[in-house]
Amino acid sequence: MRRLSFVAVALLLAGCQSADVQKAESHLDIPSQWRQNVGPASQAEGVWWRNFHDSRLNQYVDQSLRYNSDVLIARERVNEYQARAYASEGSLFPSLDVGLNGTRARAQSAASGLPVHSTLYKGSLTANYDVDLWGANRSASRAADATLAAQQAAAAAAELTVASNVAAGYVTLLSLDEQLRVTQDTLTSREEAYRLAKRQYETGYTSRLELMQADSELRGTRAQIPQLQHQIAQQENALSLLLGQNPANVPRNSFDALTPLAAPSQLPSSLLNRRPDIVQAQRELIAADETLASSQAQLLPSISLTASGSYQDDGLAGLLDNPLRLWSVGGSILAPLLNRQALNAQVDVSMSQRNQALYGYEKTVRSAFGEVNDSLDAITRYGEQLAALREQEQVAEDTLRIAQNRYRNGYSSYLDVLDAQRTLFSTQLSVVQVKNNLLLAQISLYRSLGGGWSSLSG
């Protein structure tokens, strides 16, 4: 009865847990549709970058997923937490220690005065098992498993980020190439315009002012080329680092071959299962819940079972024949009494960490929906802008052709040609930049969705 009374008192004291930090409730609301009637449809596709149908891009993304430092670090972190999870499972099983000692001694006989040599072997075997009566060890093990799952999701997020950065860097590099091509073509046309203005001036048909204007536009266009070449070199260096190699020239295809894709309609709830950072936040919340349960279980009494055996013999063979001549078996109950303040504080710490994980999960989900909506809107607006700019480019080309003909025939001044050239050059650069923005928005949508989609419809 006394033993039962002691256990009852210990359980009663253990039940007085801290209540300074309350458990937070989730207020996450999953929207039923996107702000626009477009979104991800069908199953997620891992190799989404292949939808751009660029062999170089496919090669570079594959290379980055093998050699990029951030990806390799994330994968090694998975290996680390896999070992941690494996180690945490050890607390669920008994521990067993074995020992073998050998002693060689020399003494002097009191009777004969001669030296006496002796050998003593001692073997021992000790077993210990903490009975997980309240599930503290099981909760800690589940927390380690959830943390491992979170790290696996983090590795997937690192791969998605690197693949997105490589795709964006490659597209930007191609757009810079196209801007350089447009600038060089404009330089060629302005060299021809300068030669025409020079002939007109030398024949006395036009004034020196028009010649100087043509010369100024020519030099201004030529000055833009080194800047673009420097930007291309910088982009090549940045892309090389993403590929896990030293800065070098990056072979590539044409910017014209890249075509933005359309997005089909779909409800957004599947996003929760697509984005690895959402999965990571979810697993971290699970781990925090299990850690909280383990901390709460630490307030309850623990039961430990022990068993040991030993044997001494002057011969090793005899020791191996009967290793456990002396043995003992016992158990103990340990209830936390004097250190309860620290244990209660640890419960509050675990509760607060769990609440932080919940708020972090909600923030990640809301941010994901916001990023998808931003990308969808960007695709729509940039598509509209690109269509308008291409129409403007056609008009600007016609305007320049008419202005040049009128100037050659003496019906207008060189200012009309100059204005038409500037408008066309500016429009052509805008077409390249907006198309680049549209492609980057497409890549951003892939990243926001946690991947692509295997079919297009809607």
Image (cartoon, rainbow, N blue to C red):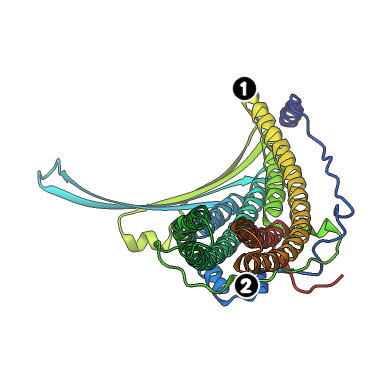
- Placement of the N terminus among the 4 image quadrants: top right
| For residue 27, above or below residue 184 | above
Q: Which of the two discs, 2 and 1, sits closer to the camera?
A: 2
Q: Can residue 156 be seen in this view?
A: no
The location of residue 153, given as percent across then percent down, is 64, 57
**How many other residues sit within 10 Å of disc 1, few (<14), some (14-19) or many (≥20)?**
few
Closest to the observer: 291 or 236? 236
Q: In this view, does 247 lie above or below 311?
A: below
Q: Distance between the residues labelled 2 and 1?
A: 75 Å
Q: Position of residue 190 (x, y in %)?
A: 52, 64
**Number of numbered callouts drawn:** 2
Q: In which quadrant of the rendered image does the C terminus lie?
A: bottom right
Q: Residue 256 carries which label?
A: 2
Q: Nearer the viewer, residue 388 or 100?
A: 388
Coordinates of residue 62 in the picture (x, y in percent)? 54, 71
What kind of element bears circle 1? loop
* Earlier-in-chain disc, 2 versus 1: 2
Within 10 Å of the Cα at label 2, are there few (<14), some (14-19), or many (20+) other Cα atoms? few
**25 shown above or below 322:** above
- What mark, if any, has residue 338 been given in the picture? 1
User: Would residue 180 be found to the left or right of residue 134 on screen?
Assistant: left
Q: Which quarter of the figure has residue 145? A: bottom right
On the image, the x and y values in percent for residue 131 come to: 65, 45
- Nearest the viewer among 396 and 274 is 396
Residue drawn at x 62%, y 22% as measured from the top left: 338
Q: Tell me the kind of residue under disc 1.
A: Leu
- Circle 2 sits in a helix, a strand or a loop, which is it? helix
Q: In which quarter of the image is residue 300?
A: top right
Residue type, label 2:
Asp
Residue at image position (71%, 45%) is: 285
Q: Is residue 148 visible?
A: yes
| Residue at the extreme front | 204
